[in-house]
Image (tube, coloured by chain):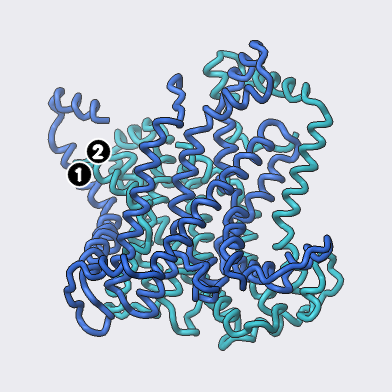
Amino acid sequence: MTKTDPSTDRAPMTESVVTGLPPERIREQRRRRNAFRKPVTSVLRHVFLITAAVLMLYPVIWMVVSSFRPTELIFRDAGLVFDSFEISNYVEGWEALTYPFNVYLVNSGLVVIGSIIGNLVSCSLAAYAFARLEFTGKRFWFAIMLLSIMLPIHVIIVPQYVLFSQLGWVNTFLPLIVPKLLATDAFFIFLMVQFIRGIPRELDEAARIDGAGHPRIFLQIILPLMVPALATTTIFTFIWTWNDFFSQLIFLTKPGLYTVPLALNAFQDAQSSTDFGELFAMSVVSLIPIFLIFLFGQRFLIKGIATTGIK
Amino acid sequence: MSALGELRRVKGQPVSRQRKQNKAAFLFLLPWFIGLALITIGPMVASFALSFTRYNLLSPPRFIGFENYVRMFEDERLHKALAVTFQYVFISVPLQLGLALLLAIVLDRGLRGLSLYRSAFYLPSLLGGSVAIAILWRQLFGVDGLVNVVLGWVGIEGQGWISNPETALGTLMVLNVWTFGAPMVIFLAGLRQIPVMYYEAASVDGANRRQQFRHITLPMLTPIIFFNLILQLIGAFQSFTQAFVVSGGTGGPVDSTLFYTLYLYQQGFTSLNMGYASAMAWLLLVIIAALTAINFWASKYWVFYDDQD
């Protein structure tokens, strides 16, 4: 059996509470149940799953392999063999637009960092209030917060644009970052509230008896304990902001301020039918950060979706 | 929570404690309150007001009553956009969720290499919203794209899937189905919550695997199916990037990929019909809210809540 994440494999625990059997016993039962399964079905399952996984990832791998092929060969070759290792696509693609590609990477990076800081600070503050404080109208505001998660951005984008253009913020990163500092990504408030609710209240009480006020309880007790929720928020904010296209398209129109998605879109428009190699190379570059996050932050990603999905 | 509050009042706790928490809560929530007022509610109200005006950013908005809403009834492109979006949502979301459920069930419980498979299926959900993947899609389904090369191997004459108005929307649906990993992870977590003892009781009673699936797994999973359905429906209605990139911002060929949000963008930010775009935004909100409400109403008839917990 491969390593299973203990946090997602809570079922034996909950079950042992219900049945009164020790968790080991339940795991044992499961193993026996699985052992009964015919080996043939098991092999069939693996064949099915491997086929499906290969089919799913084929296009992406093909894009990576193709980015190292000369453009004229890309569409003749559907295979995945690294038959050529031409880095010229990367070298030329990097300089193909008005600015070198690192400008766009830095722009995206700035927006991402600003958004992450904004979400971490503002959402954790709001989450503490919702999870730990009693205040007038709490249920009402909590409901408003939940509803705002589902509000399509398109409903507010026009007046937002008017507002930000009157402030002279169009063609700056402010319209993309300032809303995050004001906790408009309410999804993360919800995620953090769920997490804080799981932290024993006795810890707060103990600190309160020692004379700590809410700012100190928040900073010294809750915040250090909610690092996993902060990590999940960081990772999701990274991915969503890095991939975001709609709001960046609206608020950034100067090529010098283009983020990676805008640059790729401009690249595609300019190239129409030539130089797919370069276009692919830069697309691969744009996916590398996401892929790295996926590799190293997977645990938080999976847990993040699973917990907010269920509770 | 409310019971606790009641108790406190009965016990006559000093009012100052309550007041203090109000003040603390206000300070903790201050950024959120400002955001709610200036970035969310304010613009919502403004957008509602703008929907009754003609406004192009350059000259002040002019009140025109219901004209924008009346115009919607005659706007052929809007009807096309609605048709395209509804087709996209109602075909691709069920397919996506079906596939997610199928793979979650195949992956569930003690399969060797589970986490590896889960990663492989989950990765596309992270990539799917990016411009890079939209660009890849455009090449995959192009006249001499990968799909046609593969079809050529088995002797099928390919075509330009993206340039053909009959099939262009289909390629975007495939893209959406391709991102089934996120709902699959939610399904997997849901499957793990089902107590094994239900299955054991069923086997003792002689139920076979199919019966167990039909009478235990499926009913126990309905709340998760419902949750995924709501989430994906709302998300799919707002799809934008893929259609924009694949069609080069036009929604073509012949408006066959003109997503509602794409048309809204064209009206608001290309033609600067900001009044009309605001009215369109409100129609979108009403559609999404109505669909969600219908779903909640219908859930009474098919979503099963296990009250034994």
- In the image, taking residue A3 as reference, residue A191 lies left or right, namely left
The residue at the point 68 percent across, 37 percent down is B107
Total numbered labels: 2
Q: Is the residue B121 above or below the residue A254 in the image? A: above
Q: Residue furthest bottom?
A: A98
- Specify the quadrant of the image occupied by residue A288: bottom right
Q: Which residue is mark 2?
A: A134
Callout 1 amino acid: Asn
Q: Secondary structure at mark 1?
A: helix
Chain A tint in image? cyan
Chain B tint in image? blue
On the same chain, marks 1 and 2? The answer is no
Residue nearest the viewer, comparing A41 with B168 = B168
- In the image, taking residue B297 as reference, residue B18 lies left or right, namely left
The residue at the point 81 percent across, 66 percent down is B152
Chain letter for mark 2, please: A
Q: Which residue is mark 1?
A: B22
Callout 2 amino acid: Glu
Residue A135, percent from left and from top:
22, 41
Tell me the crowding category of disc 2: few under 14, some 14 to 19, or many 20 or more residues within 10 angstroms, Cα based.
many
Residue A93 is labelled as: none
Residue B119, percent from left and from top:
67, 48
Quadrant showing the C terminus of chain A: top left
The residue at the point 39 percent across, 46 percent down is A190
Residue nearest the viewer, comparing B160 with A118 = B160
Q: Is the residue B251 above or below the residue B156 in the image? A: below
Residue A38, percent from left and from top:
81, 26
Q: Residue furthest top?
A: B205
Is residue A284 in view from this perspective? no
Q: Residue furthest right?
A: A83
